[in-house]
């Protein structure tokens, strides 16, 4: 039971460190963007940066054995896609992007469940 408490403490501490790192990166990015005179940075820089930070945090959560935040991944993808749209001069509406990501998440759940069942079946055969 003691090792279980140690594992939970490690996960909690690691999760807090990753979250605090994310906030630090976000605040640094925001400050740097505000320091740069208008017109120098391309449109979408803020959204692209925010998306990269959110997706990166979830990547590190997963790499440390922690459960990634589905909502964080969702927001990261929306921000990144919107930022890339702004950067490229395309007018990408947020609502269709949300619908596309929602649909992809449904399909991903179906595929991942099917793969998990196939792996279990192969294991027991």
Image (cartoon, grey):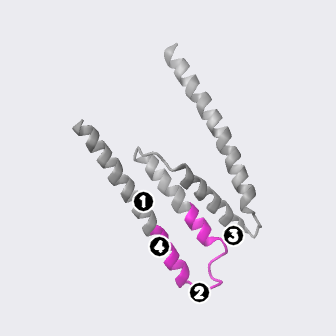
Farthest-out residue, top: 125
Dot 2 crowding, Cα within 10 Å, few <14, some 14–19, many 20+: few
For residue 53, above or below residue 45:
above
State the extent of the magenta-drawn residues as a range.
25-51
Left or right, 117 with respect to 106, comes to left
Q: Of 69 and 56, which appears nearest the observer? A: 69
Give the mark nearest the N terminus, 4 or 3: 4
| Quarter of the figure that contains the N terminus | top left
**Marks 2 and 4, Cα distance to the nearest angstrom?**
18 Å
Image coords of residue 119 (percent x, y): 54, 24
Farthest-out residue, bottom: 37
**Marks 3 and 1, Cα distance to the nearest angstrom?**
27 Å
Is the C-beta separation of discs 2 and 3 under 8 Å? no
- Residue under label 4, please give it: 27
Q: Which mark is residue 19?
A: 1
- Residue under label 2, please give it: 37
- Residue under label 3, please give it: 87
For residue 65, above or below residue 53:
above
**Marks 4 and 1, Cα distance to the nearest angstrom?**
12 Å
């Amino acid at each position: 039971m003691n090792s279980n408490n140690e594992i939970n403490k490690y996960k909690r501490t690691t999760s807090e460190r990753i979250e605090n790192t994310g906030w630090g990166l976000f605040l640094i990015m925001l400050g740097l963007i505000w320091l740069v005179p208008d017109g120098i940075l391309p449109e979408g820089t803020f959204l692209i940066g925010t998306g990269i930070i959110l997706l990166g945090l979830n990547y590190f959560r997963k790499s440390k054995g922690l459960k990634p935040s589905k909502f964080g991944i969702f927001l990261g993808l929306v921000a990144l896609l919107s930022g890339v749209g702004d950067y490229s001069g395309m007018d990408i509406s947020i609502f269709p992007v949300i619908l596309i990501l929602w649909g992809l998440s449904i399909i991903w759940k179906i595929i991942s469940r099917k793969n998990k069942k196939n792996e279990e079946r192969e294991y027991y055969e």
